[in-house]
Image (cartoon, rainbow, N blue to C red):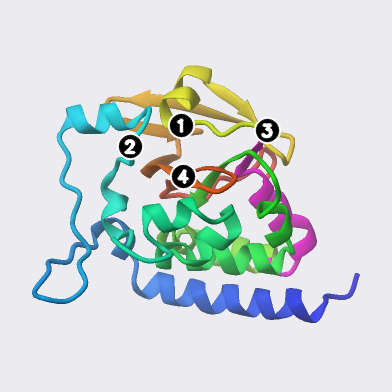
Amino acid sequence: MPFSPLKIAGTVGLAAALSVGAVACGSDSKTSTSSSGGSTNTTMAQSPTTMMAGLTSANFGPGCAAVPTSGAGSFSGMAADPAATAASNNPALSTLVSAVKAAGLVDTLNGAGPFTIFAPTNDAFAKIPTATLNSVLADPSGALTKILTYHVIAGQSLNAQQLADAGTEKTVEGGEVKIAKSGDTIEINGTSAVVCGNVKVGNGTVQIIDTVLMPPGM
């Protein structure tokens, strides 16, 4: 099936974003900026008690420090927009946004929902082996779509505690994800951790994760 111009452009953007992510590996979870009269990105230092409370309500996790404190990409800004639009305003999710555009899923993720979305950071995409990445990029309507839809739970907007209590959830791709709480960390499939949890968007809840989830058989 021939690629449309939109999908080709999105795929090229994804490859470029991955290159940047690989060079800047580690930036998403370690960003901390102090204020000296300009805009501020405040590090969200959290005690275990704060993080545990966050599993049901507030945002939690070290990756939250990379979220802008104001504007469209802030927590309040993202809450006003549907998922794909909200992600496009968060610099830590630029590679995911390129992937979503390449797969033609923007309208789907901006739909009515509700959705629970596991959103891999730029660094998460940079972990994908080169051979696997090349294979995925060559099949935006197949492999790429399969991977992206494995990160989406439809019909529910679940916070981290609800996910942990459920234990397993079926994804739009058709496969299941396994969720467990280990101390103050929420883990998915034993390979990925929530680094910024309970991010509200206009049509659901986003859990930002540190490793891309691969569907069964991939």
Frontmost residue, 62 versus 106: 106
Precedes in sequence: disc 4 or disc 1: 1
Badge 1 local density, few (<14 within 10 Å), some, or many (20+)? many
Is residue 68 visible in the rendered image? The answer is: yes
Across and down, in percent, residue 207 comes to: 46, 43
Q: Type of residue at label 2? A: Ala
Across and down, in percent, residue 157 comes to: 56, 34
Residue at point 24%, 59% (across, down):
30
Q: Secondary structure at mark 1?
A: loop
Is residue 184 visible in the rendered image? The answer is: no
The magenta stretch is 137-154
Precedes in sequence: disc 2 or disc 3: 2
CA gap, disc 1 to disc 2? 9 Å
CA gap, disc 4 to disc 3? 15 Å
Q: Which mark is residue 155?
A: 3
| Quadrant holding the N terminus | bottom right
Across and down, in percent, residue 214 comes to: 60, 45
Q: Secondary structure at mark 3?
A: loop
Q: Which residue is mark 2?
A: 58
Find out whether residue 145 is within the magenta segment.
Answer: yes
User: Would you place residue 104 above or below residue 119 in this image?
Assistant: below
Residue 182, picture quadrant: top left
Q: Which residue is mark 4?
A: 200
User: Would you place residue 123 above or below residue 169 in this image?
Assistant: below
User: Would you place residue 120 above or below residue 26 in this image?
Assistant: above
